[in-house]
Amino acid sequence: MTAQATDSSIHTPAGSPHFHFKDGALHAEAVSLQKLGQDLGTPLYVYSRAALATAFNAYKEAIGTRDVLVCFGMKANSNLAVLKEFARLGSGFDIVSGGELARVLAAGANPSKVVFSGVGKQVWEMRAALDAGVKCFNVESIPELKRLSAVATEMGQSAAVSLRVNPDVDAKTHPYISTGLKENKFGIAIEEAPAAYALAASLPGISVVGVDCHIGSQITEVDPYLDALDKLLKLIDELKTKGIILKHLDIGGGLGIKYDDETPLAPKVLLDKVFAQLQARGYAELQLVMEPGRSLVGNAGVMLTTVQYLKHTEARNFAIVDAAMNDLMRPALYEAWHGVLPVVPNSGANAPATTLYDVVGPVCESADWLARGRQMALNEGEIIAIESAGAYGFVMAGNYNSRTRPAEVMVDGDKYHVIRQRETFEDLIRGESCLP
Ligand code: LLP
């Protein structure tokens, strides 16, 4: 029963040609996922090195000779091996914490290609970033600006600053991952930006270098970006009249990927339109910064999990697997849709009946599901792949129900490397102690 799937409910892998069926079995590059799951156990995150490079090169090719710095939004996947790959490919990084700074430095990234975003930067994080020599701070509020001025002054340094403005545009995505609307906590309202820039220009220890926005995530339309860009360019016009000249414009991340039937926004489509607008408005010399996360890693990874039990109830059929909401939180948190593929699909006369399954984990919460209402022919004990798990997968994993976090592995051609060991019980209780 290892023949190529013929069942129409078995879709082809989403998004990346580096995950494909060969001899009836799903492979990452030249490595069988069945073998990986059996050798290393499940749940298991599997990334494809070639898929990371393909995604990054799509940006590189779209950029051509234009002055664009891609800063990988590393919150999407911060494994050191992943960061190292992007650093090698020439990527910069968008960080949001002192922890992320430590990771990019450990991965050998060039700090002058690092931008520091986030609404809640603490003094120690500012100090560490100044020490490291990051390209700029994306400052999100006046109090943050004042704090940064004080910290930099005390260190005898000048902090390069880009103000993150909130352009109040609708990214037309899930409310939890939409960040450019007035009601969001992010950025400085565009109407208040001129005054904020005037203040920034007057503060000691601050050097104004750019403007920044990030309107949301999993965006598949170009118009929200162009609306935001239009507002940012009007702001740059106004600043120019006040003698505040910016060197770069950061349009954030947010490009969507194909989970199901979405048509992703290609970097080239976005960049060509953005540059056409920059040219038309006389800003062709501005450096463009981008902070893509999901589109660089999302479809470069899957999560493998093993079916433990098939439970048939009056109302639903459940495939109870060994991965749960603590391992991949997106379905529980956003009702996100991820493709599910048996790694060796059952077919032929002895195949189990195709049944409508909810794929659920063992955690004691009704929100603990990974996929709902999927037609599949499953046997207990078989391995299935949850697709598009390379972004916001492992990074959002936790230890709820005292579950150890999965291992992560990177496939490279016909080889694989464990890039993070599976956690052990000792890891789980590390740092805990009982009263005497
Ligand atoms: N820059 C900033 C300032 C951001 O806040 C984000 C993501 C990015 C860049 C990268 O955005 P991307 O290219 O990945 O869309 N956990 C959610 C996504 C949260 C995104 C948060 N910010 C999810 O699983 O869908």
Image: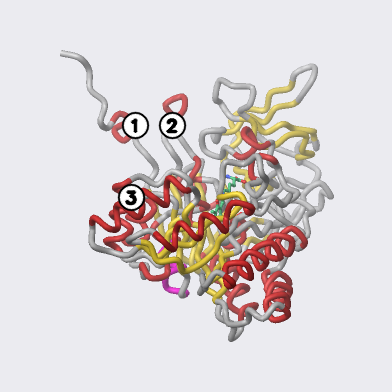
**Looking at the image, residue 271 lies above or below residue 320:** below
* Ligand 1 lies under 8 Å from the Cβ of mark 3: no
Read off the residue under disc 3: 125
Task: Decide which of 233, 382 is in the foreground and name it.
Answer: 233
Amino acid on which the number 3 mark rests in the picture: Glu
Tell me, yes or no, whether the two marked residues, 3 and 1, touch with CB atoms within 8 Å: no
Q: Where is residue 60 shown, x and y percent of the image?
A: 58, 77
Residue 247 vs 198, above or below: the answer is below
What is the number of the mark on residue 399? 2
Q: Is 290 left or right of 432, judged from the image as shown?
A: right
User: Residue 78: where, in percent of width, then height?
Assistant: 44, 54
Q: Earlier in the sequence, mark 1 or mark 2?
A: 2
In terms of image quadrants, where is residue 264?
bottom right
Secondary structure found at label 2: loop
Q: Which residues are magenta?
A: 83-89
The residue to which callout 1 is attached is 428
CB of mark 1 within 8 Å of CB of mark 2?
Answer: yes
The location of residue 79, given as percent across then percent down, is 42, 54
